[in-house]
Image (cartoon, rainbow, N blue to C red):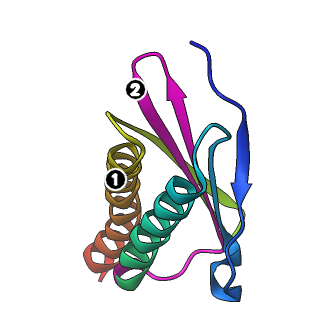
Amino acid sequence: MRVAPMCAVATPARKHERIDVRVPTTSTARLERELGAFARYCVQRIERDLGEHQRWLVSIELGRLGYSAIVEIEHLGLIVETRGYGNDGALAIWDAMCRIEQELRHQVVIPQKITISNN
């Protein structure tokens, strides 16, 4: 599979500096803005429920069979990563975000169950 080279999209607000969104260099400026805004929206939605994480990397790639998105979270020295797929960049981001949200929820629930069962 051949993947287009990547470039980083700058985010203006300091709160968003920890969210790095990368899109294929063949993307238009408008598509870069739209995918960046959508990825940041997804991050904010997840963090509203599960708390803020130190660093997010959202990388969108275009392959022969469609788009894929890699979402990587780094927090307190731990890294969680997942990949999503779709017919366009936004669907790939959404798929990856849903997967990583479930992983994060699973990590949050297990310690709570252990704490409750030990009491």
**Against 91, is 62 above or below?**
above
In what quadrant of the picture does the N terminus appear? top right
Q: Which residue is mark 1?
A: 94
Mark 1 or mark 2, which is nearer to you?
2
**Viewer-nearest residue: 29 or 77:** 29
Give the distance between the C-alpha atoms of the residues marked 1 and 2, in whole angstroms: 14 Å
Query: In the rendered structure, which disc, 1 or 2, sits on the residue that comes first in sequence?
Result: 2
Q: Is residue 102 magenta?
A: no
- The residue located at (40%, 68%) in the rendering is 42
Residue interval drawn in magenta? 49-72
Residue 26 % position (x, y): 63, 37
**Against 71, is 26 above or below?**
above
Residue 17 sits in quarter:
bottom right
| Left or right placement of residue 17 versus residue 83 in this view | right
Residue 107 % position (x, y): 41, 62
Local secondary structure at mark 1: helix
**Viewer-nearest residue: 119 or 42:** 42
Amino acid at dot 1: Trp
Residue count near mark 2 (Cα–Cα under 10 Å), binned few <14, some 14–19, many ≥20: few
Q: Is residue 53 magenta?
A: yes
Local secondary structure at mark 2: strand
Residue that protrudes farthest toward the top in the picture: 1
Disc number for residue 66: 2
Majority SS type along the magenta span: strand
- The residue located at (57%, 56%) in the rendering is 32
In what quadrant of the picture does the C terminus appear? bottom left
Residue 84 sits in quarter:
top left
- The residue located at (72%, 54%) in the rendering is 8
**Viewer-nearest residue: 17 or 108:** 17
- The residue located at (58%, 75%) in the rendering is 53
Amino acid at dot 2: Gly
Residue count near mark 1 (Cα–Cα under 10 Å), binned few <14, some 14–19, many ≥20: some
